[in-house]
Structures are given as C-alpha cells and as structure tokens.
Amino acid sequence: MAKLFSFGFWNALAGIILRNRAVIFLTIIGITIFLGFQWKNMRFSHSEANLLPDDHIVNIKYQEFLEKFGEEGNLIVMAIKDSTLFTPEKLKAWNNFNNSFKAYKEIDLVISIGDLKTLKKEDNPARFELVPFIKDTSYTEKQVYRYKKELFNELPFYEGLVYSKKSNTIQSALYLKKDIVNTKIRKRFIIDILQPAVLAFEKQHNIDIKVSGMPYIRTLNSQSIMDEIQIFILAALLVTSIIFFFFFRSFRATFISMTAVIIGVMWAFGILGFLEYEITVLTAIIPPLVIVIGIPNCIFLINKYQQEIKKHGNKAKSLQRVITKVGNATLMTNVTTASGFATFALTESKLLKEFGIVASINIIALFILCLLVITIIYSYMPQPKERHLKHLGKEWIEKLMDWMENMVKTRRVTIYFSSIIILIVSIIGIYTIKVSGSLLEDMPKATGFYKDIEFFEEEFDGIMPLEIVIDTKRKQGVLKLPTLKRMEKLQEILEETPELSKPISIVNLVKYSKQAFYNGNPKYYQIPTSQERNFILPYAKSFESDANIMKSYIDSTGQYARITTFMKDVGTEEMERIEANLAPQLEKIFPKDRYDISFTGKALIFQKGTKYLVWNLTLSLGLAVILIALFMAWMFRSWKMIVISLIPNLLPLLMTAGLMGYLGVPIKPSTILVFSIAFGISVDDTIHFLAKYRQELKSNHWRIRKSVLASLRETGVSMFYTSTVLFFGFSVFMISSFGGTKALGGLVSTTLLFAMLANLLLLPSLLLSLERSIANKKTLKEPTLKIIPNDEELEGSKDEE
C-alpha cells in the first residue's frame, strides 16, 4: 500500500494517463453508458425503513405478530369534520363515494356509515342478526337526523372507528389488500385513483376531506423524496458552479468541473441500479452529495494546475505535477472521506449499510473521475491565458492569507483561549440534547398530508398503530371470562393515556354483544357476567361470519389476542416513559406465570430502531475517528501528531453538538448522521495541510516555523475555496421540506465552517507551539509513507528557476 502513495507510483501514473488519454476517455464514456443502462433497476422504497436488523428481538416479535394477524399497516382513513354532512344530499353522496372504492381490486374492505352493521336480537329462533345501520336509502331529513343521533348516542362500539365524539367528526376506513401494501400497486392506487377521487368530491360538494393512514403517508412521503432529488441535484449544480465561477472567473474551469461531477451523478444513479438498492431518504441524498464533495476535488486539482502554469508556463509539466502532487493528497482525502461513510456499512441496519456502501464507492469513483476528466480535458485545451489566472493574486485573498498568518504568528493565545471557551460552552450544550424517535418529525410540514396527520392526531388521538399481543398460554384462552375482564382493565388504562387512542380488541365485540342482547341499550355496553357468558360465543361467531372482524383480533387457535391502539407522534423518551408506566400495571393485571404480554407494531419498531440507529451511528463515528487516527499514525509515525490532527476536527463536532442542545435540535437518525459526514469531509483539509507541511519540512531542512507558514500560504486558498463551496453546497439541503434533510444540511454546513477555521488557525498554531516536541528530525522519523518531494527534489533547483 505504501507504493500507492509513493512519488514513483504517481509519476508513472501521470505518464500512463497522459499517454493514453484518448483510450481512458473512451473507457469513461463506456462505463457511463453501461451504468446508464442500470438506471432501469432503480426503484423507490415502498415500505418504511426498518432501522433494526432482522434478528433483533423487536423485529422477531413483529414478524410473529404478522404471522398470526397479518399486515397491520393496510388502513387508509378518510374523515369529514363538517356539520352539513348530515343533510340528505351530502350524506348520500358521502356513502356513494365510499361505496365506489369497493369496485377496485386493490381494496379488501370499506367501512363507512353506509356500510355499518348493527347487532339485532331476534327471538324466533333466538339469535343475533347483523343488519344494515342505514336501511332506507331515500335519505329524508328526518331519517338523517335519526342516523346521526343513533350513531353518536347509541353505538359506542363504533367510537374511534367511525366517529369521534370530540367534534362529531365522521371517519371512513379503506383496507387495502395486504399483499399490495409494500408494492408499487399501492402507490398507483393512491396517486392515480384515491387522490383524484377525493379532489373531485371536495370540489363538487364543497367539503374538506382529510386523508391519512400509514399506506397513504408512506406513498406521499416517498413522492416528496422523488420530487426533491431533482431539485437538490439542480440546486447543488447551480450553487456550486456559481461559487466556483466566482472564485476562478473562468467558464472553462467551471465547465470542466461540472462535466466531471455530472458524470459522477450519472455513475451514482447507475451504481444504485447495479446493486439493486432501493432509493430511500438516505440514498436519495447521494447524487447531490457527489456534487458537493466532487467540486472540492476539482478546486484542488485546477488550482494546482493554474499555479503551475503561472509559475513556469509549461502545460505538460503542469498536468504531470497535478497528478503526481495533488493527486496523492486528494486520494488520501477521498480515502478518509470514503472511510467515514464506509463505517456505516459495518452497522447492522440495512438502511445505513446500503447508504455506506454506495456513498463510499461513489466517493472513490468520483476521485478517479475528477483526476482523469480534468487532466485529460485540459490536455486537449489551449493553455490558460493570463485572465484565467488573475484570481490567484486577488487582493482580498492575499489580505485573508495575511490575516490568518498574522493570527497564527502573533495571536495564538487568543486562538487557544477562544477554542477552550467554545469547548466549555459546547459541553454544557451537549448535556441538554434530547433523543427523538418521531416517525413524523422529519416529514414535510407544509404538505397537505402532514396537516391531515395533525388533524387525525387531534380528533382520533393518533394514526401510528401500536399493538399489544396477549398470549394466554392455552387454546381458546382468549374468550375465557377472566381473560376478557383483564383485557378490559388494560384497555381502560390505555384509554387514560393521553398519547394513545381508544383501543380496539375482541373485548369491544363482546361488549357490543351484550348491548345487543338488551335490545341495543347503550348502558349495557359492557362485559357480560358469568351467567350471560353462554350468549357470547354464538354472537361473536355470527359477527365473525358476516363482518370478518373476530379473526382480526384473535388468532386461529384462540390462544393469542390483539389489542390495537394508535399513538400520537411522540419521541423516544416519551415512548420509554409510557412503557415504563405501563409495565408494572401490565404485570399486575396479567401475571407472568399465566400470560405473556408484548408490545409491537410499526410505531414501536421505529422508536426502538431510532435508539438502535443512534447507538450504531455513534459507534461508526468512533470507528471513523480510529481509522483516521491510524491513517495519521501511519503517515507521521507520531502519537502527538495524531492528537494535533484530530483536535481541529473533533472541536467543530463538539461545537455543533452543543449548538444542537441550545437550539433544541434533537438527536435522531438525520442529525446523528451529520457528525460522521462532517468529520469525514473536514479531515480532508487537515490532510492537505499536513501533507504540504511534511513536504515543506523536508524542503526547509526541518525548520518548523517556515514550513508551517509556507503550508498555510499554499494550501490556505484551496482550503478556503473548498470549505466555502462545501458550506454553500450543503446549505442547498436546507431548502428541503424534510426536517431531517434540512437539519443535515444546516448542521453539516455549520460544522464544516467551524472546521475550516480550526484547520486554518488552530492546526498551524498547535504545530508552531509544539514544534520542539513534534516536528524535529529526532521525533518525526521518516515514515513508511513517502510524501512526494518538492520541486527542487523532483527536478533540481536550477531547473525550477
């Protein structure tokens, strides 16, 4: 591996590239065409991202739940909060509207006012009949008034299912067929059928329909991701190209850079298709990420090329030095950045693993592209004119360099004092950070479907299903009277929990059976006594045969029961508090020796997954720090240099973490990702600086002060340019409607800005202050890594002059 970073290797590589430029360029075109054909394999994720590994206990329990009761996330709900609904014309239109969905093969079941059945006691023979709630479809005003009164006052069984007592809101339920819930058929139904039908009904009858449910939310959320990918790519290209042109004032340089990164974006999509990975909220940011990370590569390469042209005017020699000198350092920086992303692949989360693999592959591929495309295109183009090189001597850039040099030489105490203050303030802020496991927090707040989510949370206390599975440890144990009473007690506790909706289970059906036995009197909506027990099973079975409800809440053996409630969008800490409060009460109601109780459902999986993911991301960040520390150790063979190189990169991370605490930005998958990305990118500046510093040490016969200041002068401009591009490039993500993506953009931009200042001020200050112990010949031994020699060593000082 040492040969990969040696001068001989890069010198030989430069010759190969420049001698075979036509063949290499055609090869790049061929690879691009091949990866272009892989785009057909790209697909968007149709299911929620499961952040937990398949063998995690929470996932295992969820799979067991699905085997017993089937898919739980197939419910779409539509609601109307409008007093004019209970008029003959509108109620009839609403029922006809809901009935129209029964004609679609994607729908398994429709429940609305027009479909409701009531249990009716019949005497000859003694039985219960399920009869339609609305018998007469003439819809007179008198009948509609009676329907409204009976529904809200006499049918508590349907409270929370069909109506909300809070404000007389009416709700309909569309149950999708379970085998299409996680397929593109679901998306086509919602986008092409459901949404147009809802809009047409609203326009015709001047009624606002609220729509929600996990299939609906997932579909529109995925659609928002698709729409934003194009915006991000265009915005990233526009912003980075404008800033690039502002610095270089060259259409030629801007065009060449954009060509390289656009090919990189095409490769990114192609690699996603080739690996057949789904496009998720994480992998969706890789194409614009390629643009933002690719431009700094172009800046270092083009800046070096123009510096060489200005120095001696020899194009061939300039291109060779771009490859031999900057190519080496740029490879190191891209390897460290890719390593930061690659650590995600070591986690057990499929979502992170795929993101880490694709991102790291694209970063290395991007480096190769930038190096080859820039040098080959420049080799065919005329030599840059004087106007293309004017930016190298701009007055404001020189003043900036003078200011930084003066700070490092004369104001190091101020720099250290400021750093310590920032560190202390940041640590205080870190202690105020909270962890959030909200499924909805990062969703676009301005969209109609998010406003509908808020409506259902207010009216029906949540839309995210939370399931409680009760194992009675014996067949037909669920329908035993003691079990039903215990379940009723648990449901009362759940109903008293503000964050949970009114629960649904077989208990509701049994209570409704007793109400029907007493001629529909709502005061008898309760668990039957032991004397009335003989009536329960026949009623429940007849209800099952007509409404297919019983098997949804009891498994085929009668051993397992299911209680379904819906959660408001609470965070991880709130969820853990709810669990902690319920645990002792559950144990008291259901003794462990006779019952097993477990929580499951998509809401719980996401909550647990968030905590798991935060832990894994913390480990991956730690691993990235260790890998880069090892890289520095291999490069410099000095533990003090490892510490010095890490300080300017860890301090900005701590500063950003503190800022999150003060601003109330919680730790969640999108924000914890910031630290690994920012660290992997910010350390690039450190490597560029230290690589140049190492060269200057050898050239200046280990005179530290002169080497540090010379390194600051030469690399400072490129570091400032690249950091500025990165800052504005990542700021593009702040235009996102997704809270997580917006936070990612803002926090990474902030971290990289702090990292630039740390690498331009704190790093050289540390080198100067500790020069006697870290940078003399005795302690800084010749490393295995052979840093590329200076121009004098390469060609001799006489030739250089």
Image: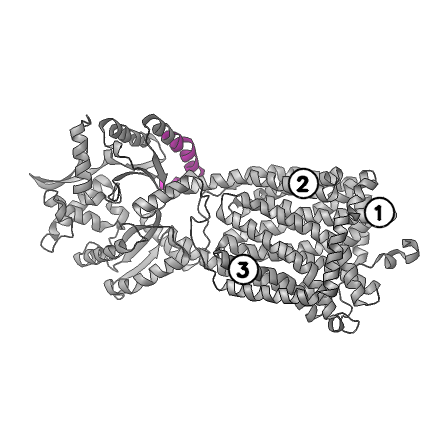
Is label 2 in a helix, a strand or a loop?
helix
Provide the major secondary structure of the magenta segment.
Answer: helix
Residue at (50, 49) in percent of width and height? 740
Quote the CA–CA distance across marks 2 and 1: 24 Å
Mark 2 vs 1: CB contact within 8 A = no
Quote the CA–CA distance across marks 1 and 3: 43 Å
Residue 612 against residue 96 in the figure, above or below: below
Q: Amino acid at mark 2?
A: Ile
Q: Position of residue 38 (x, y in %)?
A: 59, 39
Question: Does residue 384 appear in the picture of this structure?
Answer: no
Q: Amino acid at mark 1?
A: Lys
Residue 133 against residue 706 in the figure, above or below: above
Displayed quadrant of residue 176: top left
Residue at (21, 41) in percent of width and height? 545
Image: magenta residue range: 177-197
Which residue is label 3 attached to?
Answer: 657
Is label 3 in a helix, a strand or a loop?
helix
Which residue is label 1 attached to?
Answer: 310
Residue at (19, 42) in percent of width and height? 543
Which residue is label 2 attached to?
Answer: 242
N-terminal of the pair, mark 2 or mark 3, is: 2
Q: Position of residue 578 (x, y in %)?
A: 34, 59
